[in-house]
């Protein structure tokens, strides 16, 4: 059970990092006038 939870948490962590990097790349690409 604990191993499954740890694996799930790692998976969520990976998704979080992917979303965060995507958000950052979109933010840096976005025109400054539109902010």
Image (spheres, rainbow, N blue to C red):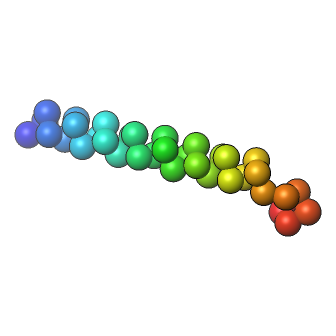
Give percent across and percent down for residue 21.
Answer: 58, 43
Quadrant containing the C terminus in the rendered view: bottom right
Task: Using the image, determine if residue 19 lies above or below residue 5.
Answer: below
Location of residue 13 (image quadrant): top left
Horizontal side, residue 23 vs residue 30: left or right:
left
Give percent across and percent down for residue 9.
Answer: 29, 41
Q: Work out which residue is located at the far right of the displayed protein and give it.
A: 33
Question: Of 31 and 11, which appears nearest the observer?
Answer: 31
Horizontal side, residue 11 vs residue 5: left or right:
right
Q: Residue at x 41, y 46 (%)?
A: 15
Q: Residue at x 8, y 40 (%)?
A: 1
Q: Residue at x 22, y 35 (%)?
A: 6
Q: Work out which residue is located at the far bottom of the displayed protein and give it.
A: 34
Q: Residue at x 76, y 47 (%)?
A: 28
Horizontal side, residue 9 vs residue 1: left or right:
right
Give percent across and percent down for residue 4.
Answer: 14, 39
Question: Of 9 and 28, which appears nearest the observer?
Answer: 28
Q: Work out which residue is located at the far left of the displayed protein and give it.
A: 1
Horizontal side, residue 7 vs residue 20: left or right:
left
* Count of labels in the image: 0
Task: Using the image, determine if residue 33 lies above or below residue 16.
Answer: below
């Amino acid at each position: 059970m604990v191993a499954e939870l740890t694996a799930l948490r790692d998976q969520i962590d990976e998704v979080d990092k992917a979303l965060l990097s995507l958000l950052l790349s979109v933010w840096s690409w976005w025109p400054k006038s539109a902010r």
